[in-house]
Image: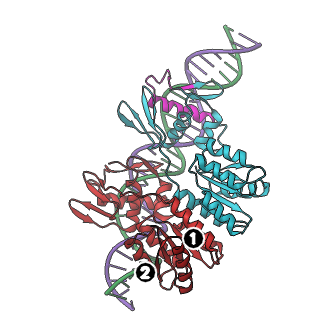
Chain colours: A cyan, B red, C green, D purple
Amino acid sequence: MTRVLVVDDDPAIQRALGIGLRARGYEVLPARDGRTAVQACEQDEPDVVLLDLGLPDLSGVEVLRKVRARNQVPVIVLSARHGSDDKVEALDVGADDYVTKPFGMDELLARVRAAVRRAVPEEPPAPVVTDAFRVELAAKQVFRDGGELRLTPTEWRLLEALVTRPGRLVTQRQLLMEGWGPGYVAETNYLRVYLAGLRRKLEPDPSRPRYLITEPGMGYRFVP
Amino acid sequence: MTRVLVVDDDPAIQRALGIGLRARGYEVLPARDGRTAVQACEQDEPDVVLLDLGLPDLSGVEVLRKVRARNQVPVIVLSARHGSDDKVEALDVGADDYVTKPFGMDELLARVRAAVRRAVPEEPPAPVVTDAFRVELAAKQVFRDGGELRLTPTEWRLLEALVTRPGRLVTQRQLLMEGWGPGYVAETNYLRVYLAGLRRKLEPDPSRPRYLITEPGMGYRFVP
DNA sequence: CCTCCCCGTTAGGAGCGCGTTAAGACGGCG
DNA sequence: CGCCGTCTTAACGCGCTCCTAACGGGGAGG
């Protein structure tokens, strides 16, 4: 899912943008000041940044410079100022686009799409390898004993959720969210059925799992 | 030197932009209508295009589409219309930026610099070859058994989307986005129809696909 | 020793997704 | 205005995935 970092100190704008973006299927990360914005840029790796210029702590241009020093993420500047100088400065420091408030949500969404489309494709995540199988996240493929094996979409979503957090416990709730979506967080039944399927396909000895471990009462864990 | 294609039928604007750009060391290629603009885009290979939407022969969006069909050159749309719909349409068709008249020369120059800076240094796309067929990305041609075979525009967009990600799974959503645009992401029907067409033309045994593989519930994959 | 959770396993039916075909709508071109 | 190619849409059969329920086992606690 595409992640959008929204940097604005005005709660009303935060709320409006959050609703509009989430309605279109974006994941929204809010930030209220420049410091947390810069931090979020390197930690959460958003796919695009919406940056208000009028922030309480750092100037917008300052934020832009810091972000650009680390990262190539596309930045769309939001500003109430119509002045030409601000635009020129922001664009020259490295902004990808500049939108003047007030703006229509449609236009903003279109500019977000354009920015994401232009973005340089990031390098594919490294494959996850164990002694028994290999998971190619980018290609959505699983290999075992040299041969590819087929997973159903649901199986793949669960395996992905586990494998991208190696060694960490993934709660039943998390797994149900990623596999089926909210509204199914109580159906722990499904997990037992599908984990059984995954073990049958991946584990050397499905009756005694080595990689997909049950944490009773909590969830499951992928052990590399 | 950076070359700028300026597409506008108003001689005054042509003149103003020409002077402003040349003063900053850009080389300016003028075009007064859509037809010559499209032609100039492939012959003269400009580094950035300034495109007025109100042209005498073709609609600006039409020009944009034709240009985008051939190369990745950044396009900045100039328009007198403030309406949100025009912006959204232009950006979704592939514009990189949208500036409303009247605009300051400083701002425009800044946006030109931003567009050029973003531009990906393009590499010549290598032809994709398999035992059964050969796809020339640059020339938009497909050969099989020595002879060229004709693809419809939609077929080509789909094949391109698949072939440029060899081995990787391409989701139904991605394919629908690239083949038809947003708003069609639910019409998985189209994919079945068009993949059938591609297989009929490309696969040695269309009933048992070898290169264009279905991943049930997820999408399709090109296997070289 | 008994009981209660929680987990693993299995099986079957419902419904979805895919491939295929064909007919009608649409638009460009002569 | 008529032709042709492309796109859209609907319908059908089939295989497979998903959901669901039921049963058995094992560990903890009383």
- How crowded pointer 2 is (Cα within 10 Å; few <14, some 14-19, many 20+) is rated as some
Parent chain of label 1: B
* Rendered residue at 45%/36% (across/down): A127
Please state the horizontal and vertical placement of residue A161, each as a whole percent of the image.
56, 37
Decide whether residue A88 is among the magenta residues: no
Q: CA distance from mark 1 to mark 2?
A: 20 Å
Identify which residue, B70 or B163, lies in the foreground. B70
Parent chain of label 2: B
- How crowded pointer 1 is (Cα within 10 Å; few <14, some 14-19, many 20+) is rated as some
Image position of A145 with respect to C3: above or below: below
Q: Is residue A180 left or right of residue A202?
A: right
- Residue designated by label 2: B35
* Rendered residue at 27%/53% (across/down): B205
Residue type, numbered disc 2: Arg
Front tag of 1 and 2: 2
Please state the horizontal and vertical placement of residue A22, each as a whole percent of the image.
66, 54
Please state the horizontal and vertical placement of residue D17, each as a whole percent of the image.
48, 43
- Label 2 element class: helix
* Rendered residue at 35%/32% (across/down): A146
Q: Is residue B124 left or right of residue C1?
A: left
- Quadrant of residue A220 in the image? top right
Residue B170 seen anywhere in this rendered image of the structure = yes
Stretch in magenta: A187-213
Please state the horizontal and vertical placement of residue D27, each as a whole percent of the image.
63, 15
Circles 1 and 2, Cβ within 8 Å, touching? The answer is no
- Residue designated by label 1: B89
Labels 1 and 2 within one chain = yes
Residue type, numbered disc 1: Glu
Residue A105 seen anywhere in this rendered image of the structure = no
